[in-house]
Image (cartoon, rainbow, N blue to C red):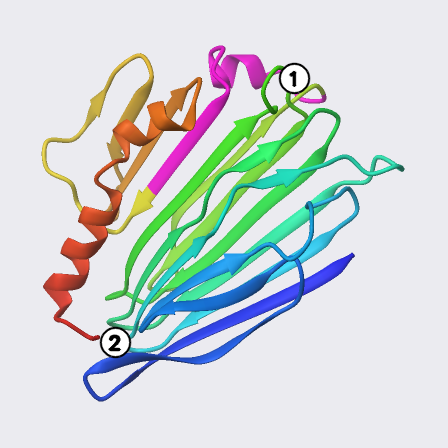
């Protein structure tokens, strides 16, 4: 199955408006606030062989919050083909994007790739969360690749790729026995960094901003580390002024 969705937020006067909101199952965007969208899964999956694409555009000075209503479960296909979700986002000067989806769950025998590409203007603000759960309750996880490439002011800013699962022998070393990997990327500089423990690390980026990664057995554990994400996002938005 091939499906695509597109969300465009623009600034109109002193508020943000959603100019474009369209999609196809299982990517169905729904307006849940003046500048907030939830993605509703209109079908199961992603299933092996699915090719899904989400395009997000935040105009100059606009604000957009994107969430999903539930976790996505990557399922195996009959022919063993890889499924893919590609998220492409652009945030213009003075824009703000908070991308806060629920986790991707890699079911046993699946092959799935989450690919994110983001282009930020120099004065754009971003909070980006990615959570991965390896296997449903009581089962081993399938193959999962997580890749992210973010440019800021047309220059490389953050890039990562993680591959975990039966086809990736380095996976156990990456996870250190955990089932959940959470990553938070933000343009904000957080005080008191760097910081780390056996299960999480927070690191400043060389060109400004912060990346936080946490491991755990349950999502609730890793969210204890990233619990301030919405407060941080609101703080960033307040610094830019109330656009709503």
Residue displayed at 53% across by 28% down: 133
Is 38 or 88 nearer to us in this picture?
38
For residue 182, which quarter of the picture?
top left
| Left or right of 215 in this view: 194 | left
Question: At which x and y percent is residue 188?
Answer: 20, 49
Q: Crowdedness of circle 1 by 10 Å Cα count: few (<14), some, many (20+)?
A: some
For residue 155, which quarter of the picture?
bottom left
Whether the residues at callouts 1 and 2 have beta carbons within 8 Å, the answer is no
Question: At which x and y percent is residue 210?
Answer: 26, 41
Q: Crowdedness of circle 2 by 10 Å Cα count: few (<14), some, many (20+)?
A: many
Is 193 or 131 nearer to us in this picture?
131
Q: What residue is pinned by disc 1?
A: 140
Residue displayed at 67% across by 29% down: 107
Question: At which x and y percent is residue 158?
Answer: 39, 46
Lower sequence index among marks 1 and 2: 2
Residue displayed at 35% across by 77% down: 59
Q: What residue is pinned by disc 2?
A: 61
- Between marks 1 and 2, how big is the CA–CA gap? 44 Å
Q: Within the magenta stretch, is there residue 178?
A: yes
Relative height, residue 23 to residue 50 (above, below):
below
Q: Within the magenta stretch, is there residue 64?
A: no
| Left or right of 178 in this view: 59 | left
Q: Which mark, residue 34? A: none
- Residue 160 visible, this orientation: yes
| Left or right of 164 in this view: 220 | left
Is 206 or 177 nearer to us in this picture?
177
- Number of numbered discs on residues: 2
> What range is drawn magenta here?
167-184
């Amino acid at each position: 199955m091939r499906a695509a969705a597109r969300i465009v937020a623009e600034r109109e006067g002193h508020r943000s408006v959603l100019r474009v909101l369209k999609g196809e199952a299982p990517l169905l965007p729904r307006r849940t606030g003046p500048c907030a969208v939830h993605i509703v899964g209109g079908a199961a999956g992603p299933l092996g062989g699915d090719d899904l694409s989400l395009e997000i555009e935040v105009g100059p000075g606009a604000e957009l919050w994107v969430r999903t209503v539930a976790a996505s479960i990557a399922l195996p296909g009959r022919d063993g083909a890889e499924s893919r979700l590609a998220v492409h986002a652009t945030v213009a000067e003075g824009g703000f994007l908070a991308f806060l989806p629920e986790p991707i769950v890699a079911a046993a025998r699946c092959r799935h790739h989450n690919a994110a590409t983001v282009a930020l203007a120099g004065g754009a603000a971003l909070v980006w969360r990615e959570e991965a759960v390896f296997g449903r309750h009581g089962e081993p996880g399938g193959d999962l690749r997580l890749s992210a490439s973010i440019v800021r002011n047309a220059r490389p800013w953050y890039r990562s790729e993680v591959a975990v699962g039966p086809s990736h022998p380095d996976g156990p070393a990456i996870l250190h026995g955990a089932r959940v990997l959470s990553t938070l990327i933000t343009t904000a500089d957080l005080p008191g960094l760097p910081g780390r423990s056996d299960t999480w690390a927070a690191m400043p980026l060389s060109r400004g901003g912060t990346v936080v990664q946490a491991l755990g057995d349950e999502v609730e554990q890793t969210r204890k580390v990233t619990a301030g994400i919405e407060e941080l996002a609101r703080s960033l938005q307040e610094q830019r002024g109330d656009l709503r």
